[in-house]
Amino acid sequence: MTALTLDHIGHAFLGRTVLDGISLTVEAGELVALVGPSGSGKSTLAHIAAGLVEARRGRVVRDYDRHAVVFQEPRLLPWATAAANIAFALKPLRLSRRIVRERVETVAAKVALERSDLAKFPAQLSGGMRQRVAIARALVTDPAFLIFDEPFTALDVALKRRMQDIVITSVTSESRSGLFITHDMAEAVRIAHRIAVLDPLGRGMAGNVTVPLTPGTRDDRAVFEIAHDFLTRNPLFAHVNDMDERRAG
């Protein structure tokens, strides 16, 4: 069963085409990493998938009831505590205070936030802790689909690894589906079932490849070897590290 379908998506900014003829599917229970050169339109495509940006052409089909987005920046309310930031996503559901508190505490534990952390304001938290709060906020509504827009770019290697573990557990261990935007091939190999490659100019998909083994079972050596093999032997990945600062997304 397909969870998300992007069918011949096209988009432009100020009359300049940034995406054209993009088709991509994410199957139920699958985590797909989307890679491509900087400026190729990855983030724009993620925002279209999330319904935050309306595509100029094509259609988006979502065969799930609810999704959530984790952005590159945590985007927390500075005047609210960590607990209140997480609970903010539950406001439309009109739940009782007891249920809200229980849900907040449950997802906080999943992302390794201590009870004492929940009373702190964003300015009192480290960058990694703020990103944990952002992930908890995404999980608290129990979405069937998660969209990650390069959420760990600013984190150091050790912290990034811990955040990746949370993603793997949150998606693959709980039967969710997800789309993960990244420019880091090692990250893509570590977390995803499949890697999709965006054309360098955003003109369709260059292709995709299934990652050997399953997320959560690849040790550091396997991640290094698989990523190195993709980058050095597979022409599909020849341009993923290119950069064009003039293009959007």
Image: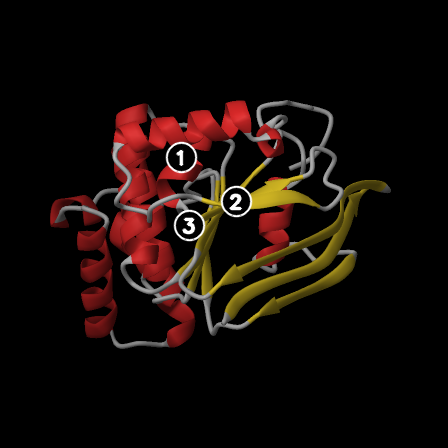
Q: Amino acid at mark 3?
A: His
Of the residues shown, which amino acid type is indicated by label 1? Glu
The residues bearing labels 3 and 2 have C-alpha atoms spaced at a distance of 9 Å
116 sits to left or right of 140 = left
Q: Mark 3 or mark 2, which has the lower sequence index?
A: 3
Left or right of 245? Residue 112 is left
Asked whether the beta carbons under mark 3 and mark 2 sit within 8 Å of each other, the answer is: no
Q: Position of residue 139 (x, y in %)?
A: 33, 59
Q: Quadrant of residue 190?
A: top left
Of labels 3 and 1, the one closer to you? 3
Percent coordinates x, y for residue 52 in the rendering: 61, 56
Which residue occupies the extreme front position in the image?
A: 233
Quadrant of res 138? bottom left
Q: At 53% from the left edge and 72% from the top edge, which residue is drawn?
A: 63
Image position of 16 (left or right of 82): right
Left or right for 208, reference 161: right
Q: Spatial distance from mark 2 to mark 1, Cα to Cα?
A: 15 Å
The disc labelled 2 sits on which kind of residue?
Answer: Val
Secondary structure, mark 1, is helix
In the rendered image, which residue does mark 1 sit on?
187
Q: Which residue is mark 2?
A: 209
Q: Earlier in the sequence, mark 2 or mark 1?
A: 1
Between residues 2 and 162, which one lies in front from this camera angle?
Answer: 2
> How many residues crowd around disc 1 within 10 Å: few (fewer than 14), some, or many (20 or more)?
many
- Residue 56 picture location, percent across and down: 79, 56
Q: Is residue 151 above or below residue 91?
A: above
Please tell me which of labels 3 and 1 falls first in the chain. Answer: 1
Q: Residue at x 32, y 62 (%)?
A: 140
Q: Which residue is mark 3?
A: 193
Q: Residues within 10 Å of mark 3 (few under 14, many from 20)?
A: many
